[in-house]
Each structure stands twice: as C-alpha cells, then as structure tokens.
Image (cartoon, grey):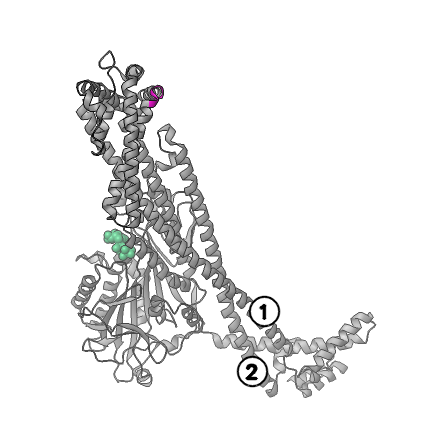
Amino acid sequence: MMEKVMRVAVRIRPLLPAELRLNREIRANVAADSRQVTLAGGHAFPCDFAFGPTVSQERIYCSSVKPLVSSLFSGRDLTVLAYGQAGSGKTYTLSGKHNDRAGDRGVVWRVCEDIFHEMTAKEHSSLILSACCVALCGDELRDLLSPDAKQKNLRITEDQNGRTVVSGAVEIPLGSMKDLQNVFKCMSDMNHQHSSSHTLLWLQLKQCGTSSQDALLSTLLVVDLAGWECVSGLVNADPSRFKRSLQISTELRPLVDMLQQDRLTLSSPESHVHTSQALSSHAHKPHTLLTQLDGSDLPKVYTHTSCPLVHSVSAQTHTHSPLVRLLQNSLSGSAQTLLLVCVSPAQSSLTDTASCLMLATRAQDKYSHADLKGEHTRQRSVLGAQGCLMQHAAALLEELQEYSLSPCLQQRLSTWLDAYKKTPHASSASHHKSGTFDVHQLPGTTTDNCDEIDASLIADAHSCEQSLQELKLHCRLQSELLVEQKLLADGLKRDQRTSEGGGQRLQSSPQTGRLPAHLNDPPACSGMAGNRRVRSSPCNLSLERLSATIKTSNQLLLARLEEQEQVPRLPSVRRTKETEGRVEAQNKDKKRSARPLLNRTWTRKHSPDLSSSTPDSQGTPGPRGACEGQGSVSESRSIGVSALLLEKERLQKRRDDLSGHLAEGSMGNEQGDGTLHQLEETIEAVDAVIGMRLHPDQQGATVRRLSDGSAPIASLRGLEDLSLQEAKALFYMYLGKAVCLRGRSASQQRRVCELEELLASEREQSSRRLQQLEKEVFFYRSSSRELRRRLKELVQDAPSPPSSQASCLRGSGDGGHGQGGALD
Ligand SMILES: Nc1ncnc2c1ncn2[C@@H]1O[C@H](COP(=O)(O)OP(=O)(O)OP(=O)(O)O)[C@@H](O)[C@H]1O
C-alpha cells in the first residue's frame, strides 16, 4: 500500500507595514477554501494546504500540523520544514512573535501545548519530552542550548548503523510551557546574531508503557531553514551579506533536489514503531542527537530499522551537505513530513515566490513504497507469462516452417529456431503446437523447478529494475541540472546584453542632458523588471541579476554625476561670476597675470580663472548678453586659457603621479582615492572652462538652450541674481558633490569587478560541473542501454514448462482435449 509521506503547505504572509508604505502590489493569493496558490497572471500552484495572508496561526496549526502530531503518539517521526526567502515568515509561523499573545504563538508552542495536555490526561508519568537544538551556518554547527561557548565536541557523525547523529549536543527535558520558554530564550540568545543560519529543533517524545519493554520513541524535528535574500535588497548591501545569501542558496540546493524527487522512501511504516526492546537490541547512538546535560550517553531514539532505498540513493548523492546529512534520518523511512513553504505576496519577491511555489508543487506527491512484495509477485507472474509466450511463439514458428515460405524467410526462421533451441530451457517446449496453447493458463504452468528458475530470474529482474530506477532517477536529475545550467547561461547572456545595451544608450544620451528612460527606475526595479523566468532553485538566480543590477545602478550614478556637472556651467552662475570677477580682475590685474597660485587647491585656482572675464558695457547683462558680449574680452581670455592649459597640465601630472603611487600601493587607498577623484574632477572643470573660453559662440548657444530649456533647468532661473560669493559657494558645493559621486561610482565599479570575478569563478565551476554531469549522463545512458539489453536477454531466457506439461500440451495439441486436466 502506498502512503503519502510528504504534505506541502504554502503560507502567504501579509504585506508588512514597510511594504504597505511603499504601496507594494500583492502578486500572490489564495482563493477561499482552495488548495492552490495563484500568482498574478493566473498561474496556479497546487499544494495540500494553501493559507492566505489573513489566516491565523491557530488555523494553520490545526489544519496542517495537528493531524500529524497524533502520529507522534503512535511512535512515528514527524518533520516540519519551513522553507522560503528571508522575511517570508518562516520563524513567525514556527515560533511566533516573542510576545505573550496566545494568538501569535507558532507551531512549536502549539505542538508542545498538545503534548503537555496529553501528559496531563495520562497523569504525567508515561510521557517524557525533551528538546535539543542546533544551528547550522555553512559547515559550522552550534548547539543553541549549550552553556559552553566553545562547543568543541559538537559534530555530525554516523553511528554503527550508518545513521547520522550530532554528537555532543545538549538535551533539555521539557516538563511545562515554562521550560519551553526557557529553551526559546536560550535559542534566541545564542542565535540572535546569526539569523542567517538553519535552526534545527528536535523534540523527542518518549512514552513509557507498563513494562520496560514497550516504550515508544518518536521525534518531531522542526527546521527553520535560512532564507536567501531578495536580490533588490542586496544591491547596496554589505558584500558579506551578499556572500552569505549566495551560500544559503548553495546550501539549500541539495535539499531542494531531494524534495523534488519522485519518492522519498521505501521502507514500511512498521519499521518506525520502536520499543525499548528494539533499543536494547540495537545498541547504538540515538536518532540524530543527544547527550544529556550531565554528558552521559543515553539510549534514546531509534526510529528506522532499515535504510530506505530510493532515499538513500539521493542522500548519498549529497553526502557532502551537512544540512542533508542532518535531515537524512527525518526525511527517510515513513517519517511524516510537512513542508511549510512561506512566501511573500509583494511584487518585489515575485520571482522567488514563483520558484518556491514550483518547489511546493513538485514536492507534494511523495509516497512511501510499502507494497514492494506485491510488486515482486506481479513481476514474477509477468516474467512467467513472458517465458511461456516465448515457448508458444517458438512452437508456432516451427509449425510455420512446414509451409511454403520464401527461402530468405525460411532461412531466418530456422536461424532463430536454432538459436532458441540452444537456450537452456527451450528444448522441452520446442514441440508445442499452437492450436492447444491456452495463454490464460500460462502463469499456472510453473512447477517446482520452474519456480526456482523463476525466483532467480525475478531476483535478477528485480535488481535490474532497481538499477534502472536508480539510473532513471539520476538521468532525470542530471538532465534537470543540464537544463538549469543552460537556462542560467541563457539568462546570463540576456542580462549581459541588457546591461551592455543600457550602457550604450547611456553613453549616447548625455547630449540631451537627460537620463535614459530605463535608468529613471530605481536600480532595484531594473533588476526585477519584466517577465523574469522562473527557476526551481534560488541559488543560481541571484548572481547574474545582481551583477546586472549593480552595473545599472553604477551607470545611474555616472549619469547623475554627469547631470550634476552641468550645474556649475549654468549661465546665470557663470554670468554672475564673470561680472563680479571682472571687477575683481580690474583691481588685481597684476596678480592675475602672474598667476602664482598654481599649487593651491582647485577651488582657489579656479576662481581667478573665472574672474578673468571682462564685464560688458551693461554691467549685469542677461545670459544671452553675457555670452554675446564675450568678444570684447578676448585678450584677457587668451591669457586665462594659456594659464588654464598650464594648470591642466600640472594637474594631469599630479594625477598621473598619484595613480602611479596608488598602483604601487605606496599610499593609503582611501585617502589617495579621494585626492585622485578631486584631481580628476578639477581637471574636467578646468577643461570645461577652457572649452567655454575657446568657443564662446558655442557657449552662447549652450546658455540659450539651457535658459530656454527644460523645466528643471528653467526653475533654476531664480538663482540668476547670485552674488559672486554665493555662486562660488554653490559651485564648490556641487563640485564637492561631484567628487563624492565620483568616489561612489569608483567604489561601485570596484564592487562590480569583484562580483564579476565571483561570477567568473562560479561560471567556471558550473562549466566544470556541467562537463562532469555530461560525462555522468553519458555513462548512465550507456549503462542503462546495457541493462536493458541484459533484461531483454533474461526475458528471452525465460523458463520452459517441464517435459510432463510439455507432453500434455503436445497431446492436447494433437487431439484438442486433455490440456485442462493436465493443468489441473
Ligand atoms: N503571517 C504573518 N503575520 C504577521 N506578520 C508576519 C507574518 N509572517 C511574517 N510576519 C512578519 O514578517 C517579518 C519577517 O518574518 P520572519 O522573521 O518570520 O521571516 P523569516 O522567513 O523567518 O526570515 P529569515 O529567513 O530572515 O529568518 C517579521 O517581522 C514577522 O513578524
């Protein structure tokens, strides 16, 4: 009988206050009483339980977990596995909020309440509950209930039965809800700085019977898997967060693979009820746990007697993953599992939500395969029938030989018959006459001798079938991986094209003084925009998209930088500077022509240059007048231009020296970078002034365009009456901003480079893995072919009926009677 061992519940959390403030759209929903989650666009994802944003903690517990908890009392194991991206509500669903409101309490509290309730009903003595909790971050394991900060002895090992255990973990007995509160306090104290780790809490229930022989042991494992972060949230994040998010995706990958397989288990439910007799006969370590507080080893839980076949194959595939190793016992056998997929309904999480829902849909149809015996019997009878049919066919062909056939066909027929007669069990069947053969009686024709052969054949066939199943499974996994790699590569190419296209558009647009339309969106959106393809796993979808997003945001910064650079060149500012500067210039003519201030800061250097403009006859002309009147000051400008050129040259030299020092590493990076950016900005400013002075006509046109131009620039007309001091201050301020933006842009570029390196190494790893997988697929295909061939041969070698039956059949073939009697 097949039994469903995995149920999948999907919970959509409500939009959080911050999301509501940002007017995030709801993109995932559950229709009332439906068992599917629907995404915007109409895609529906079926699951066993679907809970919308308004469903209470209590209802979630009562409908999806409580019915399973009863099986704990009958000695079966239960695993509740919460999966979802960061902030999707896993911890909230499992543990609830840290307040005293009963309505907010999560699954763990409610399970314990039920167990304590049962304890009270059974008058305490027969039920013992204890807890053990570890956090897994990468390969690092921490005991969340251990007072020992060093935790040297904690490690995942295997006991003598090949079962995974955490040796050195502390186990705390739970007698009341107060004890549970203490456990939660311990857990949150130990774990509050590591919210990105997987938390595994084992609640072990021991039911003592009247005699010491019939104690029942069962375990509830509650797993709060770490969640990967939404890509848009990582754009400006600390690199370590980004790295951890990637790691989490990688850590979850093997588990996701396992959950997506057809079947998890093969062992029968009986093997999950264990008595203390079983405990004593299996002198081994407990189930995935436990050493008592006093350090003594206890014979605790033994939940499975046999290693399940299909599951063990999958687990072996991922033995390198500590997470899979820790879950291996709980996800195997006929242990009940509830996969709790938590998703966010927000538009920004749509891709992650879709990938989680795909997993939920794939994971739900898992059954324990308890009907192995029935399967063998069916195979047996099929093989027996095939063997008899083969004999029947041989007899028919022999008969056919007597008719006039083409020489070629005759030849082929006799070759086949010769080959058949050489096979071990063909001779006794070679005289059958077709007319008397009743195929409905075939399975009944086996004798003792035939049974033996049958048994060996069936064993062979069974092992072949198992190998084929395994190969099929591997092939499927491999091809899924191949497809995913391909999708990844395609996505990477597409994203690269997008970001390159964006870069080109950006380069062509500064002439207009506006940002390209695609950059007006915040960077987070640019990474998520459009109909993104949905992937089954979170791990691979982040890197390339993040890199593209960061590139885009980098370009956005550059574009803004360019936009800011326009400000000091505004006509009104320039005009005021020029007007007042010209007065200053007349008063300090000598000083200006000598220009001894070459080694001052750029701001001091720059202002005399700007002040070198001569005022026109009107004193304070409008922007157009200011430009048109520039012809009269050509001489002083030419002096200014040559001095500016000298200055520019000097600055460039300084910049080159500085970048040389930075490249050699003989200077502090941060400070050096800042100076370098200042120098670059100054050079550009000097360049711009030179350009304006060399081409006053163009300057006039620019001023006209800007003063007549777009709304944002026109709104700056209010600044036309700035004094020289104000204009200077404004100019310096914007130049300072530009330097700062340049610095940020450079650091963004560095990050992009780092990410690109990371991406390249990931890509290299993927391609190595791809090659490996291709090899494996090739190997599996060829072995599969070989096995099929062998299976065919075995079928051809199927047993023949004994000679007595054969003669009966022959006799009945002659007369058309007696077969039924012989077979009876
Ligand atoms: N169903 C819900 N109702 C109300 N608030 C919720 C719900 N689900 C989650 N939240 C709130 O959303 C926030 C994030 O939830 P939670 O910490 O449980 O996410 P998580 O998936 O465990 O994240 P992580 O993977 O980072 O640990 C919390 O403030 C929580 O209170």
Is residue 223 left or right of 313 when viewed as pictured? left
Q: Of helix, strand and loop, which one carries label 2?
A: helix
Badge 1 or badge 2: first in the primary sequence: 2
The x and y percentages for residue 575 are 25, 20
State which quadrant residue 7 falls in: bottom left
The x and y percentages for residue 562 are 32, 33
Q: Nearer the viewer, residue 741 or 249?
A: 741
The tally of labels here is 2
Q: Which residue is mark 2?
A: 455
Residue 531 is tagged as none
Residue drawn at the location 40% of the way across and 58% of the way down: 359
Please identify the quadrant where the C terminus is shown. Answer: bottom right
Please identify the quadrant where the N terminus is shown. Answer: bottom left
> Relative to 658, does residue 56 appear above or below in the rendering?
below
Image region (quadrant) for ligand 1: bottom left
**Residue flagged by tag 1: what amino acid is it?**
Arg
Q: Main secondary structure of the magenta part?
A: helix
Q: Nearer the viewer, residue 656 or 524?
A: 656
> Relative to 811, does residue 108 appear above or below in the rendering?
above
The x and y percentages for residue 569 are 28, 26
Q: Which residue is mark 1?
A: 785
> Relative to 533, does residue 716 appear above or below in the rendering?
above
Q: Nearer the viewer, residue 578 or 443?
A: 578
Magenta span covers which residues?
694-698
